[in-house]
Amino acid sequence: MVQPRRHFAQHWLKSEKVLDAIVKAAGCTSDDRILEIGPGTGILTRRLLPLVQSLVAVEIDRDLCQLLAKQLGKKENFLLLQGDFLTLDSPSQLTAFPKFQKQNKVVANIPYNITGPIIEKLLGTISNPNLEPFDSIVLLVQKEVAERLYAKPESRAFGALSVRVQYLADCELICPVPAAAFYPAPKVDSAVVRLRPRQIETPALDPRKLESLIKLGFAAKRKMLRNNLQSTVERDRLTHLLQQLNINPQVRAEDLSVQQWVTLSNQLTVNS
Ligand code: SAH
């Protein structure tokens, strides 16, 4: 057993049941080109490799990379990149390996300490979306983050992350995962989620404005939206606008659906 390193957020998945659920949710076929972030000791990698056309894995830990390379040997459809996924420029790294370019799916049990930045790199942002989106992204994440990803409006978990991610992708819970499914057990429970990038029906006219509205709107969660947005929209004007949109002027940020956020932002753009 390879001893996990805490500073790389290493927790080895040991549950066959969870591995089955991840592989099933990814719906892998022999056409798929997979990206895996943080293969660790390769427990998920080994499951995926026989099913898919190719798999690129990015692992930061040099020792683990050596071990994986040794254990998995030279597999035709496997490419291991050593480095930090967040700073990796994978398109340029992969120019020498045409068959590993343009991955269409992500399947990964990721390091939890960089979940937000990983999701942002995979999806892009509202104002700078990934222009070559993945077909699907199946991730094992911390339970609290999972809940925010698939939260529906008017629920406690529905926050700025929910709106920013759901603007770009449909998000669903695949299954909860107890801490005991890992060695060592993390302090938190986990969940498998699937994100499917898609275009939003009515996009924001000014995506930067929408981003800043979301940030401000959720700044103080218990407050009414019109109070949180006071610095950018005059209270009376916002009250009037919300009424026009058939939205109770006393709403809180978490009560608006993603499409209502866009509509509000677009109204403020058109009438500014
Ligand atoms: N997928 C494995 C390991 C999960 S632990 C399993 O299911 O058992 C998270 C893995 O991500 C570790 O192997 C850790 O070394 C790696 N990791 C941490 N930070 C990383 C980064 N910035 N880029 C790439 N890999 C990283």
Image: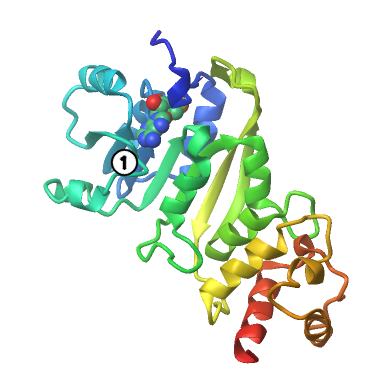
Q: Is residue 171 above or below residue 13?
A: below
Is 132 situated left or right of 91 in this image? right
User: Picture coordinates of residue 234 (x, y %)?
Assistant: 76, 81
Q: Quadrant of residue 39?
A: top left
Image quarter of the N terminus = top left
* Number of residues whose C-alpha sits closer than 10 Å to that of mark 1, classed few (under 14), some (14–19) or many (20 or more): some
User: Picture coordinates of residue 109 (x, y %)?
Assistant: 47, 33
SS of the residue at dot 1? loop
Q: Quadrant of residue 163?
A: bottom right
Image quadrant of ligand 1? top left
Q: Is residue 38 visible?
A: no
Q: Nearer the viewer, residue 135 or 165?
A: 165
User: Residue at the spot x=76%, y=56% of the render?
Assistant: 220
In the displayed orientation, state which residue is furthest to the bottom.
271
Q: Nearer the viewer, residue 210 or 12?
A: 210
Is 216 situated left or right of 136 in this image? right
Q: Is residue 38 above or below residue 166?
A: above
User: Picture coordinates of residue 252 (x, y %)?
Assistant: 81, 64
User: Residue at the spot x=14%, y=46% of the render?
Assistant: 97
User: Residue at the spot x=11%, y=47% of the render?
Assistant: 96
Is 252 situated left or right of 70 in this image? right
In the displayed orientation, state which residue is furthest to the front.
231
Q: Nearer the viewer, residue 244 or 226?
A: 226
Q: How many marks?
A: 1
Q: Is residue 271 visible?
A: yes
Image quarter of the C terminus = bottom right
Q: How is the image coloured?
A: rainbow
Residue marked by disc 1: 52
In the displayed orientation, state which residue is furthest to the left.
96
